[in-house]
Image (cartoon, rainbow, N blue to C red):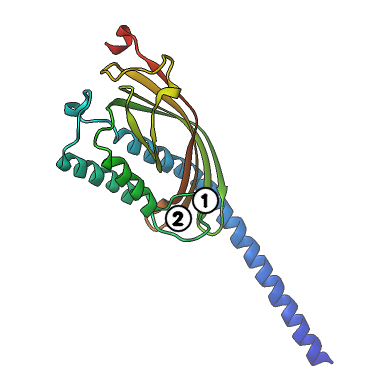
Amino acid sequence: MKHRLKKINRGIVLAVILIIGLTIYIICDYSKFKKETPLIEQTLTDYITEFSEATVTPEKYQKLNAVYSDEDSAALTNKLYGIIDNYWTINNYNNNDWGLTKSETKGEIDSFVKHKERGFIKEVSVDMNKFIVKKDGPNSALVIVSYNLSCIGNQDARMLFPNDHYYYDEEHFDDESPKQTNALYKHTNEMHSEVKLYRTKDGWKIYDAWTYSNSTHSRKLNDTENS
């Protein structure tokens, strides 16, 4: 009887030790995650900004009906691929059904670059608005981010959003059915993204992302704004 009680007591002690150890691990892991939240936010800010700015059209193509050469198309692809390789990783854990993986995001780049007649973009600006950062399992984070993405280009400008691409068409313009000209427009987008990141030895990397535009508006710039 005493021998059985000793075994039971030993089992209870071990269980308590395991529970205490697991509790300490969870607390420490969560504390570490909270400390890394600013780094996660900065990683996404840098990625969205760098990717968006990379879509600015080279000056020689900033004119109506300009067509990218094969050489310059390949250079753009390599540039955007480089950004993806720097900020993304491959991870099959807990992906969204509607999200894009690293390889799928590169596929969106390929689709974008194939449109050699895609208007032109002179400048891009990104204004980050709101971050909601949540722990999403071991070494994983889910970030819901809202930001404004604006570009100045002609009315036919096709801009590659992070993880998607979008074509500005007539329904988003102040004036009706604009004719193709070199006139400049400001295209403004209210963007929302759900992004999953994984903690790697090289820092936090994106492995799944879903982006959509909640509101899109295009306005023709006047002569003063063009100068």
Q: Which residue is mark 2?
A: 199
Q: Is residue 86 above or below residue 138?
A: above
Residue at the farthest right position? 1
The x, y position of residue 196, in whole percent, is: 49, 50
Residue at the farthest top position? 224
Q: Quadrant of the C terminus?
A: top left
Give, as a three-letter code, the residue at label 1. Answer: Ala
Q: Residue at horizontal 40%, vertical 52%? A: 203
SS for callout 2: strand
SS for callout 1: strand
Camera-nearest residue between 202 and 137: 137
The x, y position of residue 174, in whole percent, is: 44, 15
Q: Is residue 73 left or right of residue 39?
A: left
- Mark 1 or mark 2: which comes first in sequence? 1
Q: Is residue 175 above or below residue 67?
A: above
Give, as a three-letter code, the residue at label 2. Answer: Arg
- Labelled disc at residue 141: 1
Q: Quadrant of the N terminus?
A: bottom right
Camera-nearest residue between 21 and 94: 94
Camera-nearest residue between 54 and 156: 156
The x, y position of residue 166, in whole percent, is: 39, 35
Residues under labels 1 and 2: Cα distance? Answer: 8 Å
The x, y position of residue 77, in whole percent, is: 25, 45
Q: Is residue 106 left or right of residue 34?
A: left
Badge 1 vs badge 2, beta-carbon distance below 8 Å: yes
